[in-house]
């Protein structure tokens, strides 16, 4: 799939939005992804053992470990996907957040809804 090359302003805007919605550190996400709660939620593509959100969390850890100058076009595409997912999913907030699949799914995507 061909995508247009992003200019510096677009990259800066995507990175800023990503940094806004991803409120967990790489080490927090890594620790979370090892939990049974993390593994218990999300959709899985046919043939995969790991949910899409769990895979996303691993990509986010990788992105957080890079300097901005080292981010690839694929990284920026995933950052956009993360921003879109977190914003869309956050709008569906349930009455009971703690211990919900909703909370667990967001954490897989690097967003802890309990953090301010």
Image (cartoon, grey):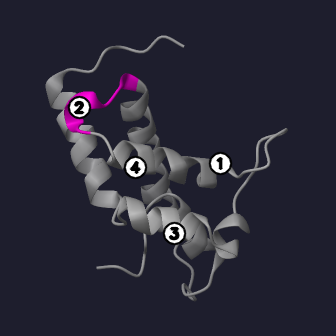
Q: Position of residue 89 (x, y in %)?
A: 52, 62
Label 3 or label 2, whichever lies nearer to me, is 3
**Mark 3 surroundings: few (<14), some (14-19) or many (≥20) residues within 10 A:** few
In the rendered view, tell whether residue 107 sits above or below residue 50: below
- Helix, strand or loop under label 4: helix
Which residue is label 3 attached to?
Answer: 31
Residue extent of the magenta highlight: 67-73
Marks 4,2: beta carbons within 8 A: no
Instruction: Say which residue appears at 63% left-offset and 81% top-offset.
Output: 100
User: Which sits in the foreground, 2 or 91?
Assistant: 2
In the image, is residue 69 part of the stretch drawn in magenta? yes
Label 4 or label 3, whichever lies nearer to me, is 3
Which residue is label 1 attached to?
Answer: 52
In which quadrant is the N terminus drawn?
Answer: top right
**Mark 1 surroundings: few (<14), some (14-19) or many (≥20) residues within 10 A:** some
Which residue of the protein is positioned furthest toward the top in this rendering?
2
């Amino acid at each position: 799939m061909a995508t247009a090359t992003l200019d510096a302003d677009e990259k800066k805007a995507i990175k800023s939005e990503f940094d806004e919605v991803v409120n967990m550190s790489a080490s927090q996400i890594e620790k979370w992804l090892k939990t049974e709660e993390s593994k218990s939620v999300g959709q899985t593509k046919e043939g995969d053992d790991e949910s899409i959100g769990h895979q996303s969390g691993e990509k986010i850890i990788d992105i957080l470990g890079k300097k901005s100058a080292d981010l690839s076009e694929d990284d920026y595409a995933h950052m956009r996907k993360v921003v879109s997912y977190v914003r869309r999913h956050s709008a569906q907030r349930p009455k009971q957040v703690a211990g919900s699949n909703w909370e667990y799914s967001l954490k897989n995507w690097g967003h802890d809804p309990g953090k301010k």
